[in-house]
Image: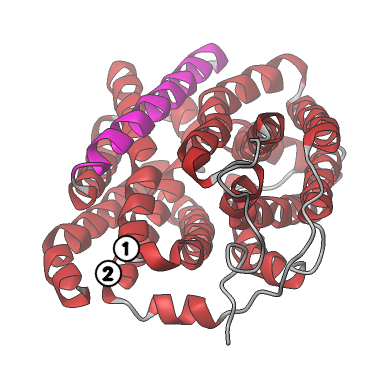
Amino acid sequence: MNIQPEANGFHTNNKEADPAWAGVVSLSLGVFGLVTAEFLPASLLTPISEDLHVSIGAAGQSVTMTAVIGAIAGPAIVIGTSRFDRRLTLLALTALLIISSLLAAFADGLVTLLVARGLLGIALGGFWAMSLALAMRLVPERLMPRAMAIIMTGVSVATVCAAPVGAWVGEAYGWRSAFVIAAAVGGLAFITQLLTLPAMPSAGAAGLGTMATVLRRPAIRLGLLTVLLVVAGHFAGFTFIRPFLETVPHFGVEGISAVLLAFGIGGFLGNLFGGFVSERNTALSIVIAATGIAATTLVLALAGSLPSVAFVATALWGFAFGALPVSVQSFVTQAASDEAESAGALMLTTFQVAISSGAAIGGLIVEAQGLAGVFGFAAVAALCGTLVIGILSRRTVATAS
């Protein structure tokens, strides 16, 4: 018999157990460090490319590397480390965050930077694949929504802070300093996790059989295809947002930091909006998010040379994308409520594949057509995702049920 990854392989806290809130907060701090490190290249691409003497498109592959490795590492770590104490596994992943950030800070060329970003991909993929199961080990089942909300706060704060702070630190102290700060955050997370997380010994082995079974469901395939299209389009554009803001609307460093801060705040608000709408209609929430991404990136492609337009469109873009993850997660979870862990693992891999393919395609488009072209691609890809979920969702979900 195949064992469902994490949730079925390990005992969770029963309803009478005391919640380990300090441990939950340490997970939030860890994900804050991971997402901050993941997003840093988007705000530092220009100085990175200049310092390492590579093109903008080549430097953008640092985003691709993290996503590619993350897509593979997530399920692999869940399965390969299933017999180890989960506390030790998490500490090892946080240590990789520290190592990868320091390696990036002292990179002497593109190869070293890509190795560093690959190590980050291992840490990021492993954490996201285990996050729900880790929370289940720390709090009773009835408190799971609150625990996940605390963990996701780390994502929201990183989304707001990473890009603008990275741009400011990069300008004031050099892009390498931003990665040193990311390493310091990782160190703080490691110490906090070491002090607060209880032992979480293995209670079984994980397998791939359940994931394959879940993937056969039409509604799951629909949701994952939507993610692949929309997220690939988003990251094709977002990877090159700083060069675009510098060369098209001609923002200075202060202006870029302000625009990226607006994007982050928009993402935070969009996450709240997506959760609110998803409770009522998950497909509608995805349509709104994907349509918003398509519309705002199209505006940037056509009228992004106007600073005011670029600022507003980027802020609204952040809002639209912020609503997407919670919307898609709700859609897929509803389609596989009996196998939520396996559906989550599939979602992780699809997100990482979409990020890597989007960044790679974006780099090729930038080299061939320039920065405006990549936002046109982002709009088309997001629009295709909108059509997939909007036109086919009812028929596919009806068939699945």
- Label 1 packing within 10 angstroms: few (<14), some (14-19), many (20+): many
State the image coordinates of residue 281 (x, y, percent, origin top left): 19, 47
Where residue 11 sits, quadrant-wise, is: bottom right
Q: Is residue 45 visible?
A: no
CB atoms of marks 2 and 1 within 8 Å: yes
State the residue lying farthest toward the bottom. Answer: 1
**Crowd tier of the residue under label 2, counting other residues whose Cα lies within 10 Å: few below 14, some 14–19, many 20 or above:** many
State the residue at coordinates (75%, 31%): 182
Say which residue label 2 marks. 219
Residue under the point 77% across and 32% down: 189
Q: Tag 1: residue type?
A: Gly
Residue 266 within the segment the image draws in magenta: yes
Q: Where is mark 1, residue-wise?
A: 223
Instruction: Kindly report which numbered mark, 2 or 1, lies closer to the viewer in this rendering.
Output: 2
Is residue 350 within the magenta segment?
no
Q: Amino acid at mark 2?
A: Ala
Instruction: Give x and y (percent) for residue 344.
Output: 48, 60
State the residue at coordinates (40%, 76%).
Answer: 215
Left or right of 369: which side holds 283? left
| Residue 359 visible in image | yes
Identify the residue at image location x=37%, y=58%.
333
The foreground one among 172 and 36 is 36
Question: Alpha-carbon distance for marks 2 and 1?
Answer: 6 Å
| Element under disc 2 | helix
Residue 72 badge: none
Residue 97 image position (x, y, % from top left): 78, 43
Locate residue 37: give its quadrant.
Answer: top right
Instruction: Identify the magenta region.
Output: 253-280
Considering the whole magenta stretch, tell me its main secondary structure: helix
- Quarter of the image where one finds residue 178: top right
